Amino acid sequence: MALSGVGTMVWVVAVVLSAAVMVSEARSLLQDPCNPCFSADGSSQICCTGGRQCGPLTSAGLPTCSSAGGPSCNPCYSADGSSSICCNGPDAQCGPQLASGAPTCVPVVAPKVIIDTDFNTIGDDGQVVAMAAQLYAQGVIDILGLTVATGNAWLDQELVEILKAVERLGIATRVGVYAGAAEPFPHTFANYTEEVALFGDAIDYVGAYATPPPSASDLVPPPDGFASATQPKAMNAVDFIIEQVKKYPGEVTILEIAPAENVANAILKDPSIVPLVKQVVTQGGQMYVGGNSYRDVAEFNWWFAPDAARTVLRSGIPAYIIPLDATNKIPLTLDTYTEIATHEPATIITELYRNAFAAFFGPGPPPYPLFVFDTLALAYLVDPSLATDVRTLYICEYGLRRRIRKGAGVPGGFPRAGECEDVQGDLQSGRRPVQRPVRRPADPPSPGAFCAMILRLL
């Protein structure tokens, strides 16, 4: 929410989630894959879990599950109590009884969601999509589409992995994949190399920027191979976001678990969508803790595309932010890993999960905490009551001292380099200025050049 006054401010909601509840739900979703069963006309579906198969369609063409196993029934009874029906899946609530006294179910309107992701097969983004696919089959959320932007890897590699994922999860024919930003602007790969020249090599995660953009021959298939037939949709991610927001005004939630270039570009291309977006729920930024990217002064998603994050947060769209302050409280434990990895019967998801993290949880203590990151954003979207600590914070656009302004001359219009370092920490990390100076190269540039580069990076 934009506020008036000196300098641009944004409303940030920092969320701390209940670790026990979140881990429990994650286990359930990763371990117990949904078997979606559809109505005769394909307009509705139910989720047959617990190894159950699709049962015969009712006389009205509605889907059923076989009776063995599965979750308990949500019974809705007739007026005299002599009969009942189970209202599960998309028909999850008891409706009004008919004139004859017979029970009915009424559909729950699932929130419409666009997932904007820098996808990886079974990292945090891959886990989000696996869980979201099951929630979609259960009728808990309605996934309008998956939009992809460079972040954890380069766009082409992410597309290779997500196209296989939608086939693996059984949603390829119902949930489209839309290619988006191949590179953020102005924080491009070339710009990052200049950043390294100024501030030194990375000491933490830089995602795609660890290597130059790949050629087609460099693309690596997922462990279970390339997608057999699925291709990205012809429409690009930006146009898809605009189309869906206008189609469903006030209904679309954007689950932002990538650098925000796709959403920012949609806002810049068509600002009329801003009041039509229901909300953005995002994992990004940090408030009082250290960063997890490059020189450890910023959270990865916001460091990778800081201009995009600023555009989205300044737009006026309600933004609910799960920062590192929250994610750092919920590390993946050996007990949780073991419970998921050894689940019986095994599924392709549990096998991928086991193989991906087996070395990390090998002999000896883990080398560092392994946090779940993006999955917390999905948890909050589905159940905001999981938030146990919600804070409203304000971030200044140009730093606390406000001595940097757009259009300032070089070098005379810039503040001293030391002040510029403070502003760099404030802008890039979304928190108060860093308390220690950013390390400079052995032969630092002039103060004017130093600050000019910071403005260009941001």
Image (tube, grey):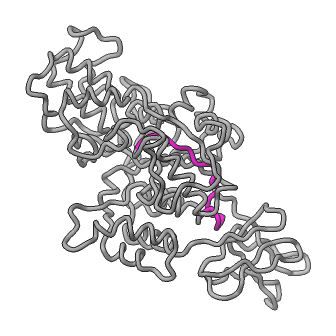
Residue 38 or residue 362, whichever sits in front? 362
Give the residue drawn at x 37%, y 67%: 19
Q: How many marks?
A: 0
Query: As drawn, is 386 to the left or to the right of 279?
Result: left
Image-quadrant location for residue 248: top right
Above or below, 419 against 257 in this view is above
Image-quadrant location for residue 139: bottom right
Residue placed farthest to the right in the image?
A: 100
Give the residue drawn at x 42%, y 67%: 353
Magenta stretch: includes residue 10: no
Residue 378 or residue 368, whichever sits in front? 368
User: Is residue 435 among the parts visible in the rendering?
Assistant: yes
Query: As drawn, is 318 to the left or to the right of 101?
Result: left
Magenta segment: 135-151
Magenta stretch: includes residue 150: yes
Query: As drawn, is 372 to the left or to the right of 360?
Result: right
Query: As drawn, is 232 to the left or to the right of 41?
Result: left
Give the residue drawn at x 59%, y 63%: 169
Residue 2 picture location, percent across and down:
46, 32
Above or below, 404 against 421 in this view is above
Residue 351 picture location, percent across and down:
45, 71
User: Is residue 320 among the parts visible in the rendering?
Assistant: no
Above or below, 309 against 158 in this view is above
